[in-house]
């Protein structure tokens, strides 16, 4: 008993972190993803030469250091319309589209006449797998905006759009 009271080390194991929770243990540093990607991009047969001395090493090699890989920038898509454009829906194209057929309205349904006659404003434009779509909200109509293909939209040049 005296041995236990005199030496607190006897109560603990040899490794000080064995009894500690994992959250308080020191974590190993992991190589950054940029360095890992650069190491993976190097050919397997070639080894890096250690840097020994600035000017002497550069003069002895005769080769300049390889430039960093260039970032590939995606081109911005070119849209057929712009945000804020005033549009209306072409009735013939809409009635023959999958969008109308998927809703299941009966023939000659009158509840959607506002999309052919009233002003719609383009809120957003995106290119999906199935084509270019615009998010349209109708001015003065209390309905949620709808994503419609841009091929069925008719652009209006002026803001004073008159109903048909």
Image: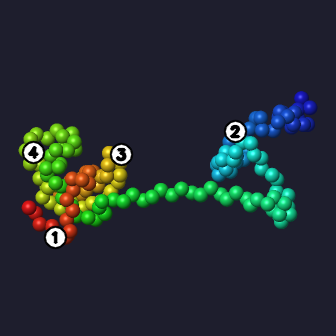
Task: Quadrant for the C terminus, please.
Answer: bottom left
Circles 2 and 3 in contact, beta carbons < 8 Å:
no
Q: Nearer the viewer, mark 4 or mark 3?
A: 3
Circles 4 and 3 in contact, beta carbons < 8 Å:
no
Q: Nearer the viewer, mark 2 or mark 3?
A: 3
Look at mark 4 in the image and give the residue it sits on.
109
Q: Position of residue 162 (x, y in %)?
A: 11, 66
Mark 2 or 3 closer to N-term? 2
The relative height of residue 158 versus residue 38 in the rendered view (above or below) is below
SS for dot 1: loop
Q: Position of residue 140 (x, y in %)?
A: 18, 61
Q: Is residue 4 left or right of residue 46?
A: right
Q: Residues within 10 Å of mark 1 (few under 14, many from 20)?
A: few
State the mark number for residue 129. 3
Q: Residues within 10 Å of mark 3 (few under 14, many from 20)?
A: few
SS for dot 3: loop
Task: Quadrant for the N terminus, please.
Answer: top right
Judging depth in this view, the residue of 26 and 76 nearest the camera is 76
Query: What is the spatial separation of the Cα atoms under label 2 and label 4, in whole angstroms?
Result: 65 Å
Is residue 3 shown to the viewer in this render? yes
Q: Residues within 10 Å of mark 2 (few under 14, many from 20)?
A: few
* Image point (22%, 44%), residue name: 99
Q: Position of residue 77 (x, y in %)?
A: 39, 58
* Image point (77%, 47%), residue name: 47
Q: Position of residue 3 (x, y in %)?
A: 92, 32
So how many labels did they put on this image?
4
Query: What is the spatial separation of the Cα atoms under label 1 and label 3, in whole angstroms?
Result: 34 Å
Is residue 146 shown to the viewer in this render? no
Q: Nearer the viewer, mark 1 or mark 3?
A: 3
State the mark number for residue 22. 2
State the mark number for residue 72. none
Look at mark 1 in the image and give the residue it sits on.
160
């Amino acid at each position: 008993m005296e041995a236990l009271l005199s030496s607190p080390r006897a109560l603990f194991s040899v490794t000080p972190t064995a009894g500690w929770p994992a959250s308080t243990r020191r974590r190993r540093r992991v190589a950054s993803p940029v360095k890992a990607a650069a190491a993976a991009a190097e050919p397997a047969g070639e080894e890096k030469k250690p840097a020994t001395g600035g000017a002497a090493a550069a003069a002895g090699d005769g080769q300049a250091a390889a430039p960093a890989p260039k970032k590939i920038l995606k081109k911005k898509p070119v849209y057929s319309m712009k945000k804020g454009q005033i549009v209306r829906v072409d009735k013939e194209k809409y009635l023959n589209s999958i969008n109308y057929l998927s809703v299941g309205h009966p023939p000659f349904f009158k509840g959607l006449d506002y999309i052919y006659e009233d002003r719609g404003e383009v809120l957003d434009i995106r290119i999906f797998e199935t084509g270019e779509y615009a998010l349209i909200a109708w001015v003065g109509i209390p309905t949620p905006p709808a994503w419609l293909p841009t091929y069925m939209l008719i652009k209006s040049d002026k803001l004073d759009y008159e109903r048909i």
